[in-house]
Amino acid sequence: MQRVKPHRTPSEPIPERDQERFARAGAYVRVGLALLALLWVGSARAAAREPLCDWLSGISEAAQAQADGDGAAAEIAARRALAARP
């Protein structure tokens, strides 16, 4: 049985075409990691919009609706404030 490729010792240099493949694969990995980092940062920013402002806004809307005598709108605004509580 013959070997298709000759055995290469670790001290032999890597052929140029293999170096190009490794460089291209490394570039793809770096681009993928950069995209992953951007997606992670974007999702973190979207998750932490303005919880304190949303909470205070919901409390004020609930209070105003209660003062106007609209109990249903007050309850909806209060639930929204509770969901946005920091």
Image (spheres, grey):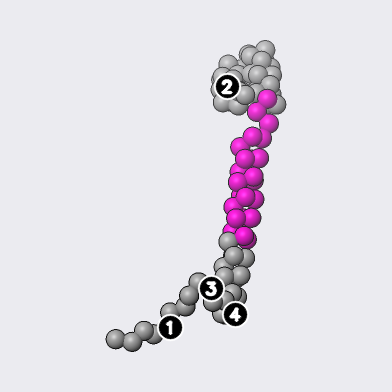
Question: Which residue type does callout 4 highlight?
Answer: Glu
Dot in front, 3 or 2: 3
Dot in front, 3 or 1: 3
Quickly name the residue at label 1. Answer: 6
Question: Which residue type does callout 1 highlight?
Answer: Pro
User: SS at mark 4?
Assistant: helix
Quickly name the residue at label 3. Answer: 11
Q: Quadrant of the C terminus?
A: top right
Residue in the foreground of this view, choosing between 85 and 81:
85
Q: Marks 4/3: CA distance?
A: 15 Å
Outermost residue on the bottom side: it is 2
Q: Quadrant of the N terminus?
A: bottom left
Mark with earlier residue (1, 2) = 1
Q: Main secondary structure of the magenta part?
A: helix
Q: Marks 3/1: CA distance?
A: 14 Å
Residue at (50, 72) in percent of width and height: 10
Span colored in magenta: 30-52
Q: Marks 1/4: CA distance?
A: 17 Å
